Image (cartoon, rainbow, N blue to C red):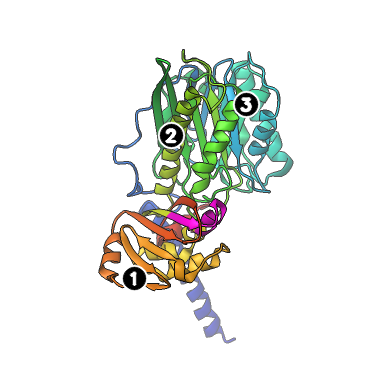
Amino acid sequence: MAKDGKDKKAKKDRKAKEAAKAAKAARKKAGKGGGAHPVSPLAPKGGFPKLPVIDGAEFAAVAAGVRYTGRLDVMLARLAPGTAIAGAFTRSATRSAPVRACEARLALKPDAKAGAAIIVNSGNSNAFTGAAGEAAVDAVSAAVAGALKIPATRVFPASTGVIGEPLPHERITAVVGDLAAALRPDAIELAARAIMTTDTFPKGASAEIEIDGAPVRIAGIAKGSGMIAPDMATMLVYLFTDAKVGPVPLQRMLSRAVDETFNCITVDGDTSTSDTLILAATGRSKAPEIRDVRTRQGRAFYDALHGVMLDLAHQVVRDGEGATKFVEVAVTGAKDAAEARKVAFAIANSPLVKTAVAGQDPNWGRIVMAVGKSGATADRDRLRIMLGDVLVAENGMVAPGYREADGAAHMKGEEIRIGVDLGLGRGAATVWTCDLTARYIEINADYRS
């Protein structure tokens, strides 16, 4: 190649690199990529809710600089002696060291007299980090155990953020003393903010009920925005209650509620390595002990717990990376519930469906496509499709009275409902998702930089 040709190519490459760098900087300045994200338009209008104080639970958060600068990134929760713990975790084959530690510790027979603690950092997931990741978990757990005078096996760690980078755990152990000194019953909102990564708002929900005349309180926080797909738990979730519930019934209720809430949402179809849900029951309420969900008291508590979990699950979808639409997909008439779930998730995870929603395009042909590819039993001539209250298709073709303008009107709202009836049986399922926009690409393209 002639010298002039080489010079031109070098100049072109340099300009391309400069343009890419400038574009990334502009996105960050606008609150995209690795910078602060504009709050989702689907966020709760009132901001973070006022959550009840849970007797026996205290919280603290600090800025440790694990990855971020100038923001809270480590939270600690201290739980009173006698607290029962239940959990649910990702089923990923590459789950993180903290997840494996929590699973192992929950399998141990709990010491009823011992307290417990939850320690969470954001910015680094401590996943796919080998023996170094396990050593980091041990070091952080030992620091918390020493500061709070509890067994290390009663420390439940979690990490969320970038995968594959060693966790600088010394930054966490260095602030454990500060965290312990700052613990307060009313600091749960700080904890919610400390566990955020690409989230645009902290997530909280609560319920207060009476059981036999005595109050029972539930408060929960969550983080999640991307890498969200059902395989429990799809994010980080921490739930606290003052109810008296033993570990066995508590775990049974949690596992059941998980399948009906967090396992019914999806943002992008990707299951995280770090998904963790911990439910802690301090037993400080004066209500009678709940031994079985089938009792009147058990049903009342379960319904309240389910409501808090569903609220948090919906908030995660509403904060889906780049989301502008909250989408409910309701499938009925399937041969059974499992087949209905197949169809619902095929629709909810379809990039073509999700981009049509983003573009406010009532392209119901994409819904037909998703039903057909789902693997579930379907009959073209029995299929009915609805957009909100608008009947779009039935009997194997477009509905006679359907007008494109009616479908388009529904797609302009922030909340979209896609209804599909297969006409084959009584199986039903409802899942929730969001649209897929260009901002999802922007956020994830620049996530590590």
Q: Find the magenta span and give its range.
A: 330-343
Task: Kindly report the distance in space between the C-alpha atoms of the residues bearing marks 3 and 2.
Answer: 20 Å
- Amino acid carrying label 3: it is Val
Kindly identify which residue carries mark 1: 399
Q: Quadrant of the N terminus?
A: bottom right
Task: Kindly report the distance in space between the C-alpha atoms of the residues bearing marks 1 and 2.
Answer: 39 Å
Q: Image point 67% across, 17% down: which residue? A: 111
Q: Earlier in the sequence, mark 1 or mark 2?
A: 2
Residue 339 in the magenta stretch? The answer is yes
When the figure is inspected, residue 195 is found, relative to residue 435, above or below; the finding is above
Q: Image point 60% across, 48% down: which residue? A: 163
User: Mark 3: few, some, or many residues within 10 Å (few <14, many ≥20)?
Assistant: some
Kindly identify which residue carries mark 3: 248
- Amino acid carrying label 1: it is Ala
Q: Earlier in the sequence, mark 3 or mark 1?
A: 3
Q: Residue 429 in the image: x percent, y percent?
A: 48, 51
Q: Are marks 1 and 2 in contact (CB under 8 Å)?
A: no
Q: Are marks 3 and 1 in contact (CB under 8 Å)?
A: no
Q: Residue 409 in the image: x percent, y percent?
A: 26, 62
For the residue labelled by badge 2, is the local secondary structure a helix, a strand or a loop? helix
User: Mark 1: few, some, or many residues within 10 Å (few <14, many ≥20)?
Assistant: some
- The residue closer to the viewer here, 129 or 228, is 228
For the residue labelled by badge 3, is the local secondary structure a helix, a strand or a loop? helix
For the residue labelled by badge 1, is the local secondary structure a helix, a strand or a loop? loop
> Is residue 398 toward the left or the right of residue 297 in the image?
left
Task: Kindly report the distance in space between the C-alpha atoms of the residues bearing marks 3 and 1.
Answer: 51 Å
